[in-house]
Image (tube, rainbow, N blue to C red):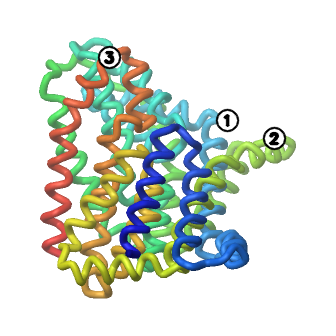
Amino acid sequence: MEIVKDLLILTLLIILLRKGFHLGHVLFATGLFFGLLHGLNPAQLLILVYQSLISPANLIIYAALILISMLEIVMRQTGSQGRLVSGMKTLAKDHRFAMAALPAIIGLLPSPGGARFSAPLVEEAARELTVSGEDNAAINYWYRHIWEYFLPLYPSILLGAQIMAIPMQAFVLLMAPFTIVTLVIGLLLFLPIGKPAHVAAPPPRIWRYVLEGLAPIFAIMILVLVFNLNILLALLVAIIFMLIFYRVEITRIPNMCWEALTPKLLYMMFAAMYLRDAMVASGAVDQLSVFIRSAGLNPMLIAIILPFSITFLTGMTVPGISITMPLMVAMGGESNLLSLGSLTLVSNMVGSMLSPIHLCLIMSVEHFKCSMGGTYRKIILPTLLLLGFGIIYSLIL
């Protein structure tokens, strides 16, 4: 009976999303339904709202989102991001390398509309090549997301690491191979593209622009992975250093901070956390785990199908992680945590990449004025190859 309730609620979630309701509202309402149908009274649900708001683990994610937005704003307004992109275009002696590198660089800083920002850059890099609109859109879309498998600047990665309760260093090492494989598989997208034009050697100052733009990103990674610094402190150090280095006027900083608050994104993250907390508090996760085990269903199959389905229908990675990962943690235990966790994360990402409502895909197709179906056909084989690697990888762990 409990599994029927869970399936009904998840079906309602999918229906509401397909009707176009705001993702935050849908996630929050789903959390309420989970609680009510599993015996939590209104007072308990209200207390759970408060607990989700002040939970230390959740507060870390809210703060990280604000700081990530602040870092992107500082880089954009100081011109650091623009000089980085211009420098990469000049450095790339092979235009095809520039086509991949530019969206990848933009992807180092997750921000809404990133694919729309990188699309004109890809178009410019491909100007002297024979490239179809579908090829351009697929390359822009694919390389925009290569870091989303392990980079702790992405909300889904922060959320996954928190739920799995493993150190960030271990989490990054676990998931980094997926980015390497994604880079290699992505070479398939360049097969239809002809020989690149010759590019003159870049002037020496271009290196300075590139290194200057990459410095805060690499600094954050080193602080987190090498010096074991908390991600929030690493972000804060990078932001303060950039404000000082670029001599940003103090009067500009309040406006930057206000822009970085991004209330819609924070609300969506809170709603995702609340749904997760409601599932745990109501016992739904434990009950579903018991049902699956007693039914003899393969946990690996669940780790593939459930996150894939959720992100395919929503086009976003956070809901799939918030709903599926607690279940995988409960089912996997200590012995299979890394195996099921990694498979859940890559299945979640595969569902997002193949989702026809993924905003980055829509924006890429719109910019290059090409066929959605044609672009989709370009990415489906590389994406399925990535999923195949994920299955093999989870069996090895």
> Residue 369: percent from the left, percent from the top?
37, 14
At x 32%, y 83%, the residue is 290
At x 58%, y 37%, the residue is 80
> Residue 163: percent from the left, percent from the top?
46, 74
- Left or right, residue 105 beside residue 294: right
Three-letter code, disc 3: Cys
Q: Which disc number belongs to residue 370?
A: 3
> Residue 181: percent from the left, percent from the top?
20, 52
| Element under disc 3 | loop
Judge whether residue 54 can be spotted in this image. no
- Left or right, residue 287 beside residue 56: left
357 vs 219, nearest the viewer = 357
Q: Which disc number belongs to residue 252?
A: 2
**Discs 2/3, front:** 3
In whole angstroms, how far apart are the C-alphas of marks 2 and 1? 10 Å
Q: Which disc number belongs to residue 90?
A: none
Examine the image and state in which quarter residue 122 appears.
top left
User: Decide: marks 2, 1 in contact (CB < 8 A)?
Assistant: yes
Three-letter code, disc 2: Arg
Mark 1 lies on residue: 77
